[in-house]
């Protein structure tokens, strides 16, 4: 599996993401600077990791969505490539129009840094193949703008088409509408989620609750 992790000014979870991908697949991902204009050939997966790209000025992810590399990522996605965006990466995906909706300020306007419990809403996707629908797992939150919002028509479409990947299964601390923590593209190849599964992909960092996501990716893409 050949994966690339895109690094923006202010990204801070790229090495956590690399560890999770390496542990699941046995392959070292590439680090790709946002100022590049083209993706390396032969990629299976592009990852937009967490952090505070461009200091979260304007809106979280809005400036990163205009980075030179993003046009190539859009082309890659439009051709059926797999794209994972976590936290700031999810924000970038919505700002770039690759996923619907927006991430607003958390309810209560406080930065949240704590574990949450996620419920698997859609099994059998490239990102959830290792789980069964209804299973739960822990993942850390670390965001100030994780309050997912979309209009009712969009929310009804996401739910009707089975494109909600994860919901908050305990207390919904950031106020996300309908408890949505992660969503999928219609072809199931793009996933955006706010909590950080990569931080629970090794016992040394607190557990392996998030590892099945990366194992699902590796098994899907190796077998593709």
Image (cartoon, grey):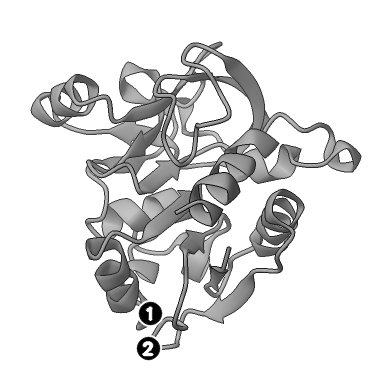
* Residue 61 found in image quarter: bottom left
Q: Position of residue 36 (x, y in %)?
A: 44, 88
Q: Is residue 78 above or below residue 99?
A: below
In the picture, the quarter occupied by the N terminus is bottom right
Front-most of residues 138 and 142: 138
For this view, does 212 lie left or right of residue 35? Answer: right
**Do the numbered discs 1 and 2 sit on residues whose CB atoms are within 8 Å?**
yes
Q: Who's the residue at 59% across and 65% down the image? A: 11
How crowded pointer 1 is (Cα within 10 Å; few <14, some 14-19, many 20+) is rated as: some
Q: Which residue is mark 2?
A: 37
For this view, does 162 lie left or right of residue 153? Answer: right
Q: Is residue 3 above or below residue 113?
A: below
Report whether residue 133 is seen. yes
* Residue 73 found in image quarter: bottom left
For the residues labelled 1 and 2, the Cα–Cα distance comes to: 5 Å
Q: Position of residue 203 (x, y in %)?
A: 87, 36
In the picture, the quarter occupied by the C terminus is bottom left
Report whether residue 60 is seen. no
Secondary structure under tag 1 reads helix
Count of numbered badges drawn on the protein: 2
Mark earlier in primary sequence (1, 2): 2
Q: Is residue 177 above or below residue 192?
A: above
Q: Residue furthest right?
A: 204
Q: Who's the residue at 21% across and 28% down the image? A: 158
Q: Position of residue 101 (x, y in %)?
A: 24, 41
How crowded pointer 2 is (Cα within 10 Å; few <14, some 14-19, many 20+) is rated as: some
Q: Which residue is mark 1?
A: 69
Q: Position of residue 132 (x, y in %)?
A: 52, 17
Secondary structure under tag 2 reads loop
Front-most of residues 53 and 72: 72
């Amino acid at each position: 599996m050949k994966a690339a992790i895109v690094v923006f000014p202010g990204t801070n979870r790229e090495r956590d993401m690399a560890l999770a991908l390496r542990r699941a697949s046995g392959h070292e991902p590439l680090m790709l600077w946002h100022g590049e204009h083209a993706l390396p050939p032969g990629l299976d997966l592009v990852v937009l990791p967490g952090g505070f790209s461009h200091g979260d000025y304007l809106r979280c992810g809005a400036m990163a969505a205009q980075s030179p590399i993003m046009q190539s990522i859009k082309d890659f996605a439009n051709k059926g490539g797999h794209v994972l965006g976590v936290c700031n990466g999810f924000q970038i995906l919505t700002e770039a129009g690759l996923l619907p909706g927006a991430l607003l300020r958390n309810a209560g306007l406080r930065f949240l840094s704590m574990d949450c419990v996620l419920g698997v809403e859609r099994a059998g996707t490239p990102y959830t193949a290792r789980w069964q629908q209804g299973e739960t797992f822990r993942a850390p939150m670390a965001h100030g703008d994780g309050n997912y919002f979309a209009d009712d028509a969009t929310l009804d479409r996401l739910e009707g088409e089975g494109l909600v990947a994860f919901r908050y299964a305990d207390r919904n601390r950031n106020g996300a509408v309908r408890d949505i923590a992660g969503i999928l593209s219609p072809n199931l190849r793009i996933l955006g989620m706010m909590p950080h599964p990569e931080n629970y992909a090794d016992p040394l960092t607190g557990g392996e609750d998030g590892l099945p996501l990366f194992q699902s990716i590796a098994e899907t893409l190796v077998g593709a």
